[in-house]
Image (cartoon, rainbow, N blue to C red):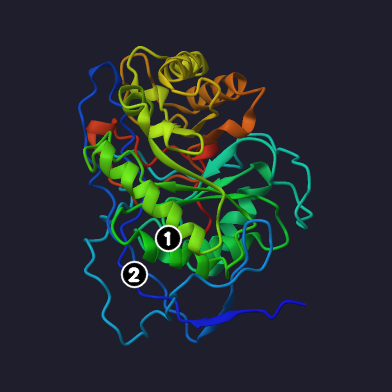
């Protein structure tokens, strides 16, 4: 029997930027908006050291990364971090910011995915879902709060998309899923700085076991919002692949950007394991809620036409419809409109439900309400739902 190789490691205090993108896809002349909502988040420091056994995505034990050194102790200095996101608590008296509404369970039906990988509960089939571990005031959720969230939606969806490694989210979500759910994960390297450090944080959060990870994304709408050039994200993808391989992961690695950025720069997809795009019909003023699926079908055909490999898989890593906010031409927010849009979107992906991720599990009350996003930024939660954890 092989001798297990272990590394005693203390989770590092990384000042990594994380969060989600601007909702703009910039089609139809929509103004460009750089993502200013998201800054660096706190990380919870563990109270004691932990042993990490590195395992690849197939569950096979492997040696630790070459040259791996234990991270700095809690007494070390953390890298400089950007300011945290603004407190986005909702003022119900402010007309420009729609009220905090607690809704019933989401309208999406429970997907009974096939069990597998040793996890007995549903969660492998059906649409993916995005999730962010932040409280309504912008703080980090605790393990218990994340576990409550996961318990509220995991069984209804397939792969869960996370955007970064801050707030111990990889560890907390992985623990929350445990043996109760068999959902896979789409993890995110949000910041192109310190890619190796973010990969290390992932590996430690997973305790070296990558078997639950379906994909790792690099960046999020960076070309679209001017945060990085095509050359920079392509170079970051290569760096990420090398770091991930050293950490025991050899699965899918993709660059995520908007569909318009990909159509203009198809090499973003050419170098990725599959083509990963964010696509929000709401930001096209000529698309009504019931036409959201048709809009996406048209854009998918446009993407396919520019790809080097015409048979490459295309996955929409974000899409949805707000249930509250201001109108954008024919795109009108609303409860019935959200339901109509989600029905249309699911219909467009009926033959390949795992190729679309719905945005998002809960309302993001920590975000900033802005005219540029039609005062809808906080209200994309499935079924209008707020997190019970706050």
Quarter placement of the N terminus: bottom right
Q: What is the secondary structure assignment of the residue under circle 1?
A: loop
The one of 362 and 206 positioned closer to us in this rendering: 206
Q: Is residue 259 above or below residue 171?
A: above
Q: Is residue 93 visible?
A: no
Q: Is residue 341 above or below residue 102?
A: above
Label 1 to label 2, Cα distance in Å? 9 Å
Q: Are marks 1 and 2 in contact (CB under 8 Å)?
A: yes
Q: Residue at x 28, y 16 (%)?
A: 28
User: How crowded is the residue under tag 1: few (<14 C-alpha within 10 Å), some, or many (20+)?
Assistant: many
The one of 217 and 83 positioned closer to us in this rendering: 217
For disc 2, the marked residue is 14
* Image-based side of 285 in relation to 275, left or right: left
Q: Is residue 176 visible?
A: yes
User: How crowded is the residue under tag 2: few (<14 C-alpha within 10 Å), some, or many (20+)?
Assistant: many
Q: What is the secondary structure assignment of the residue under circle 2?
A: loop
Q: Residue at x 57, y 49 (%)?
A: 251
For disc 1, the marked residue is 165
Circle nearer the N terminus (1, 2): 2
The one of 312 and 319 positioned closer to us in this rendering: 312
Q: Position of residue 61 (x, y in %)?
A: 66, 68
* Image-based side of 270 in relation to 374, left or right: right
Q: Quadrant of residue 33?
A: top left
Q: Is residue 230 above or below residue 40?
A: above
């Amino acid at each position: 029997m092989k001798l297990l190789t272990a590394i005693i490691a203390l989770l590092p205090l990384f000042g990594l930027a994380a969060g989600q993108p601007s909702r703009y896809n910039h089609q139809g002349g929509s103004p460009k908006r750089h993502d200013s909502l998201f800054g660096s988040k706190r990380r919870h420091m563990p109270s004691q050291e932990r042993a990490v056994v590195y395992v690849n995505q197939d569950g096979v034990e492997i040696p630790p990364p070459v040259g791996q050194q234990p991270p700095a102790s809690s007494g070390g200095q953390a890298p400089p971090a950007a300011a945290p996101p603004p407190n986005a608590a909702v003022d119900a008296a402010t007309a420009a910011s729609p009220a905090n509404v607690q809704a019933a369970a989401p309208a999406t039906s429970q997907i009974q995915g096939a069990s597998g990988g040793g996890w007995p509960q549903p969660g492998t089939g059906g649409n993916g879902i995005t999730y962010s571990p932040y409280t309504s005031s912008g703080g980090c959720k605790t393990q218990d709060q994340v576990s409550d969230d996961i318990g509220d939606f995991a069984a209804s969806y397939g792969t869960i998309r996370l955007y970064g490694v801050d707030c111990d989210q990889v560890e907390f979500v992985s623990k929350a899923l445990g043996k109760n759910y068999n959902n896979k994960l789409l993890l995110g390297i949000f910041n192109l700085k310190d890619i190796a450090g973010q990969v290390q944080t992932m590996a430690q959060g997973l305790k070296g076991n990558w078997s639950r990870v379906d994909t790792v994304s690099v960046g999020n709408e960076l070309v679209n919002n001017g945060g990085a050039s095509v050359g920079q994200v392509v170079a970051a993808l290569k760096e990420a692949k090398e770091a991930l391989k050293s950490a025991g992961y050899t699965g899918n690695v993709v660059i995520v950007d908007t569909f318009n950025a990909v159509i203009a720069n198809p090499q973003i997809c050419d170098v990725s394991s599959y083509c990963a795009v964010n696509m929000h019909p709401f930001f096209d003023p000529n698309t009504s809620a019931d036409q959201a699926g048709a809009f996406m079908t048209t854009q998918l055909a446009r993407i396919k036409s520019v790809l080097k490999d015409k048979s490459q898989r295309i996955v929409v890593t974000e899409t949805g419809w707000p249930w509250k906010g201001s109108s954008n031409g024919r795109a009108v927010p609303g409860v019935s409109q959200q339901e109509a849009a989600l029905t249309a979107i699911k219909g467009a992906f009926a033959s390949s439900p795992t190729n679309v991720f719905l945005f998002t599990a809960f309302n993001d009350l920590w975000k900033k309400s802005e005219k540029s996003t039609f005062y809808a930024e906080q209200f994309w939660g499935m079924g209008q739902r707020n997190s019970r954890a706050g």
